[in-house]
Amino acid sequence: MSKLLVVGTMAYDAIETPFGKTEKTLGGSASYIALAASHFDVEIGVVSVVGEDFEQQHFDLLSSKGVDLSGVEIVSGGKTFFWSGRYHNDMNSRDTLVTELNTLADFSPKVPENFKEAEVLLLGNLHPAIQISVLEQMNKRPNLVILDTMNYWIEHTPGQLETVLGQIDAIAINDEEARQLSGEYSLVKAAQKIQEKGPRFVIIKKGEHGALLFQKDEVFFAPALPLEEVFDPTGAGDTFAGGLAGYVAASRHLSFDRLKNGLIHGANLASFCVEKLGTERMESLEKSEVKNRLQAFKDLTHFTVELD
Amino acid sequence: MSKLLVVGTMAYDAIETPFGKTEKTLGGSASYIALAASHFDVEIGVVSVVGEDFEQQHFDLLSSKGVDLSGVEIVSGGKTFFWSGRYHNDMNSRDTLVTELNTLADFSPKVPENFKEAEVLLLGNLHPAIQISVLEQMNKRPNLVILDTMNYWIEHTPGQLETVLGQIDAIAINDEEARQLSGEYSLVKAAQKIQEKGPRFVIIKKGEHGALLFQKDEVFFAPALPLEEVFDPTGAGDTFAGGLAGYVAASRHLSFDRLKNGLIHGANLASFCVEKLGTERMESLEKSEVKNRLQAFKDLTHFTVELD
């Protein structure tokens, strides 16, 4: 079985949306990514850090999905990364109310021996120096390295970010980040400029407007499923990336076509993620539900215009 | 050959975008709709009004595309509807600088005899009373009546608009208008509410984010083609509607699948419209260009995820 190594945050979130709120729920990019990737036939290892307050039930949840947590450091006396946010009525924008880095502030990732030859490496949104240190710990170059980053690193650590960009295969960022990173408003031009920085594949996430995949002259678009209600968008982008990485790792094949399918699987899983608060929906998601909704994605986009 | 009757504005526009400007160019919904629909095997008739200043070259342009202009009233001494707008840097928002209704203020549409049995009727964005008067002039109910409207009529003439909605088959409006008309933020819920008002098919245009088609539980999404440069978005929505109406009229068949294809043809033609200022690109657009780009739409969205 292929291995997927995920480096990212494990957190507790307090989330408020127009539809509900929670004071403390499992969060963090690595949690969402692992839950999504666990839908594929792949061994998942997580490298992250938590505090002593991290609850056994959340370790158990991830372990029950087959996720290897030997790379998760527990800092004694430490507190787990905490994030709190409030969504506006349109659910497309949010205010961050609190960010407490806690144990994340001194995170020094250690890749477990059994994942140093992972086929796929997903570098979640973290300081570029941390991302580089993970790449350096690998015994062999993974077949596919996918990177996430954010405006903070684009602004504050551009040099180190450029270094990481030169060493990865794919980047998955949102439209605003792509514009900021490239200095181009057109996403087509932005994708070209970002490819020049290193990654062969550029994936631009547009939230409720879907996601684009670029490689040279090829472009593919995966829609977001139109939903009656978006309950909580937290983690949708990470779920998307986790589905993409999990699918590609399981298919053991790297091509534009495989990545296309990966985007669809990612979008499919993300459409579930937003249906409940936090990770709740992903915790109980069944194989049959996933499969049925893949058919909905086909119905949503396939057409038969004759070209003659 | 099927007949498509288009009721809408013919105008002169002054447009300013970050990429260029023009003091006076052919505009108006009926002009864009007719130019787009002329790519299909259908007889197109336009009902509109212009002033004495409307130039022969613009009549000639539309006539050369096979458009029947016998329903266009020329008001002696009158001036053609004039609109002026300036686009912001993101090209997604614009300021209207000038709106001079001129001859449009007293527009009383007269459907020519040879179009009173048209199979498809496209009611462009006009006062609902004008739209009703056109419906009343038809000798037989068209197979498909498509309506466009805007926030102004939703706010100021809600009663008359409800009357029109009860008499049409399809509505094509943008996302903000759909939300305003339905009072629902979710586009899925908005489409349900709007269907309850009459139209079987609800088409929601999201500009650069594509368009959605709803009928009961079915939904289809047509993406907008990602472009390196959007030169001028003016008329893109009308071009989309014209392509949709032209295709459906030519195919002489009314079904969800035909409308799906219609959306793709509409999105395809709209992707050309925005490449130059005003109607310039549509005036010179070749069949082969249209066909090649349809293939790009297929490549953009088709995938082969196995469901077993």
Image (cartoon, coloured by chain):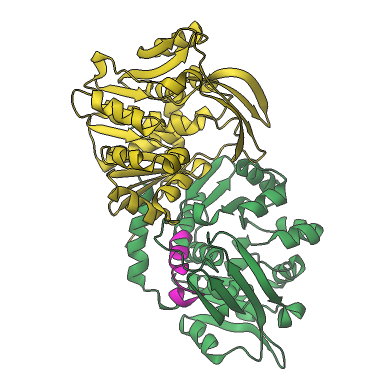
Chain colours: A yellow, B green
Q: Is residue A182 visible?
A: yes
On the rendered structure, is B247 left or right of B191?
left
Q: Is residue B299 visible?
A: no
- Whether A224 is drawn above or below A54: the answer is below
Q: Position of residue B95 (x, y in %)?
A: 64, 66
In magenta, the rendered stretch is: B267-282
Q: Position of residue B30 (x, y in %)?
A: 59, 74
- Whether A143 is drawn above or below A50: the answer is below
On the rendered structure, is B84 left or right of A161?
right
The residue that appears at 49% across and 40% down in the rendered structure is A224
- Whether B87 is drawn above or below A98: the answer is below
Magenta-colored segment: predominant secondary structure? helix
Q: Residue furthest bottom?
A: B77
Which quarter of the figure is the C terminus of chain B placed in? top left
On the rendered structure, is A171 left or right of B195?
left
Residue A139: image quadrant is top left
Residue B101: image quadrant is bottom right
| Nearer to me, A287 or A171 | A171
Q: Position of residue A238 (x, y in %)?
A: 44, 30
